[in-house]
Amino acid sequence: MNQDLSILHLVLNASLVVQLVMLLLVVVSVTSWAAIFRKLFALKRVKSLNDDFEREFWSGTSLNDLLAAATQNAKQAGPMERIFASGMREFQKLRERRISDAGTLLDGARRAMRASYQRELDAIETNLSFLASVGSVSPYVGLFGTVWGIMHAFTGLASLQQVTLASVAPGIAEALVATAIGLFAAIPAVVAYNRFARDIDRVAIKLETFIEEFSNILQRNVGAHAASASGH
């Protein structure tokens, strides 16, 4: 019973298939942690850029000035600023074509903002499906390694005359390490996925609210423009 049952010893003495399963799970775990940190910083940046633009938008700055700033800083702009720019550009293009119908102007701007919103949301959700896959698949991959390891251990015991706990324990312990590594890979991925999905939902709601508020502003502008034109 004085056998070395340390994790490192168990891994090094596991069968080739179990070692390959463990290696795969370690690689997946490292990749998922990298994806988690990237997504964490990306979402923090998205929130910060959205908050900055929203403050600027409601500060009284003219729409033309906001569009000029958004066009100049297109690469550093946040999702909300890009959605605003796409809607405002479409609105101005329709105006340049001498389209005066309020419904046409607003529908064009809204469609442009919706298309931009979908692109932004797709970009924000990058790597989210990977984390979901890691969280759901890793335990089963680890379980496969465990089942294979136990089968291998019992196959080796078949040639023994007398089976004791000392002869069974190492093989089963080696196999169970695969399940442990699978859970180690899956649990952070599941927790991170749930957290990011909740954060992305909040960002999406905020962007949708902005689209509605900006559409109302454009509608008031069209109404004011129509009123001044009819006055003249």
Image (spheres, rainbow, N blue to C red):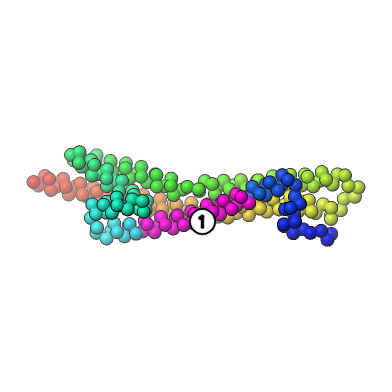
Res 158 quadrant in image: top right
- Quadrant of the rendering where the N terminus is positioned: bottom right
Q: Which residue is denoted by mark 1 in the rendering?
A: 37
Using a 10 Å C-alpha cutoff, classify the residue at mark 1 as few (fewer than 14 neighbours), some (14 to 19) or many (20 or more): few
x, y percent for residue 217: 25, 51
Specify whether 148 is left or right of 49: right
x, y percent for residue 9: 75, 56
| Residue ID at (33%, 57%) | 53
Front one among 99 and 152? 152
Q: Could you say whether the residue bearing mark 1 is in a helix, strand or loop?
A: helix
x, y percent for residue 72: 29, 52
| Residue ID at (75%, 50%) | 14
Magenta stretch, main secondary structure, is helix
| Amino acid type indicated by mark 1 | Phe
Q: What is the residue that sits farthest to the right in this orientation? A: 161
x, y percent for residue 117: 37, 46
| Residue ID at (14%, 47%) | 227
Specify whether 25 is left or right of 192: right
Q: What is the residue that sits farthest to the left in this orientation? A: 232
Front one among 65 and 205? 65
Instruction: Provide the residue span drawn in magenta.
Output: 26-51
- Does the magenta-highlighted stretch encompass residue 45? yes
| Residue ID at (84%, 53%) | 167
Specify whether 158 is left or right of 148: right
